[in-house]
Image: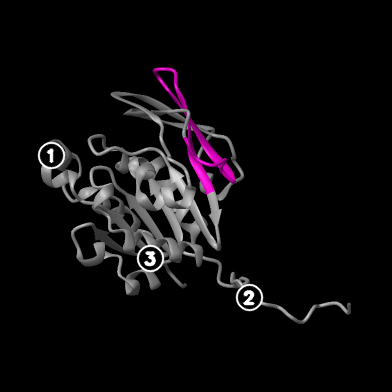
C-alpha cells in the first residue's frame, strides 16, 4: 500500500511562551496531531515548525509531501514570503492543504483565497455544535448528523472568504453565532480544506471527531495520480479541420 505523505506544520510558538498552552499541548499542537496520525497505517507523517531552516518547508520536503496541514496564530507575519510562494506553487501543482482554526489568517490561506479572511471571534469557552451539511462528502465519513465541542473559542460570520466550492460543516455556538466551519476549495490541481475547530488552550485536537475529520480531509486532499498539466502554451495545430 502506497502511503500518503503528510507534513504537519505548526509555528510552534505558543507552547514555548505560555505555560497554559504547554500544559494542554506539551509537544505542541503539531505533536498531538502527529501522534494520532502515526497510528494510521496509510499515513507517513513528519512535522515542521517555524524555527527550522526555511520553516521546515524546504523544496525537498514539499516535493515529498502529498498533504500539508497548517496551524498558526501568533507568528503569521514571521513566515517568509518566499516560503509562502513555494507552498502556493506546490498547492497549484497538486499538493493538498488542510488549514486549521486560526490558520485562516495565515499568509498562505489569504493568498489562496484572495480575500482578508476576517471573521468575528469571542473566547469564553462556549459550546460549539458542528452540523454535517454534506453527509455524502468523504470528509464527513464516519460522523453522525452533528458533533459537539464542549468548550471552544467562537468564530462568527461574516467570514470573508470566497464562496466554498463545497461546504461540509456549519457551526452553531451557545452565544448564538453560526460559522462555515468546513470549507473545500480547488486551486489549480490542489485541494484545500479549511477546518475551524481548534485552540491552543482547549484540548480540541485530542477529540476523536476532530481527529477523524482531519484524517478524512487528508485522504480527500491527496493529489490525483494522473491529470492534465496546467500550463500556458501555444497550440498552433487545431484538433478539427478548419
For the C terminus, the quadrant is bottom right
- Local packing at callout 1 (Cα closer than 10 Å; few below 14, some 14-19, many 20+) is few
Secondary element type, mark 3: helix
Q: Is residue 40 above or below residue 134?
A: below
Mark 3, Cα crowd under 10 Å, few <14 / some 14-19 / many 20+, is some
Residue at which label 2 appears: 233
Dividing the picture into quadrants, the one containing residue 6 is bottom left
Question: What residue do we see at 56% from left, 67% from top?
Answer: 224
Going by the picture, which residue comes out furthest to the right?
242
**Separation of residues labelled 2 and 3 (CA atoms):** 22 Å
Task: Check residue 158 for magenta coloring.
Answer: no
x then y, percent, for residue 128: 40, 27
Mark 2 or 3, nearer chain start = 3
Horizontal arrangement in the rendering, residue 155 relative to residue 199 (left or right): right
- Compare residues 18 and 53 and report the one nearer the observer: 53
Q: Tell me the magenta residue range.
A: 160-184
Amino acid at each position: 500500500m502506497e502511503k500518503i505523505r503528510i507534513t504537519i506544520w505548526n509555528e510552534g510558538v505558543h507552547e514555548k511562551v505560555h505555560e497554559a498552552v504547554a500544559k494542554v499541548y506539551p509537544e505542541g499542537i503539531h505533536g498531538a496531531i502527529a501522534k494520532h496520525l502515526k497510528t494510521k497505517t496509510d499515513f507517513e507523517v513528519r512535522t515542521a515548525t517555524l524555527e527550522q531552516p526555511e520553516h521546515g518547508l524546504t523544496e525537498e520536503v514539499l516535493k515529498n509531501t502529498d498533504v500539508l496541514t497548517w496551524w498558526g496564530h501568533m507568528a503569521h507575519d514571521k513566515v517568509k514570503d518566499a516560503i509562502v510562494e513555494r507552498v502556493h506553487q506546490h498547492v497549484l501543482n497538486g499538493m493538498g492543504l488542510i488549514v486549521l482554526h486560526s490558520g485562516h489568517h495565515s499568509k498562505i490561506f489569504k493568498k489562496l483565497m484572495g480575500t482578508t479572511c476576517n471573521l468575528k471571534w469571542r473566547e469564553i469557552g462556549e459550546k460549539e455544535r458542528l452540523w454535517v451539511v454534506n453527509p455524502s462528502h468523504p470528509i464527513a465519513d464516519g460522523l453522525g448528523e452533528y458533533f459537539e465541542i464542549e468548550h471552544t473559542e467562537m468564530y462568527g460570520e461574516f467570514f470573508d472568504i470566497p464562496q466554498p466550492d463545497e461546504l461540509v460543516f456549519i457551526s452553531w455556538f451557545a452565544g448564538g453565532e453560526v460559522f462555515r466551519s468546513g470549507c473545500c476549495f480547488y486551486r489549480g490541481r490542489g485541494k484545500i480544506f479549511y477546518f475551524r475547530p481548534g485552540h491552543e488552550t482547549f484540548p480540541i485536537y485530542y477529540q476523536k471527531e476532530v481527529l477523524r475529520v482531519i484524517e478524512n480531509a487528508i485522504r480527500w486532499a491527496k493529489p490525483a495520480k494522473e491529470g492534465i498539466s496546467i500550463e500556458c502554451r501555444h497550440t498552433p495545430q487545431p484538433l478539427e479541420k478548419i
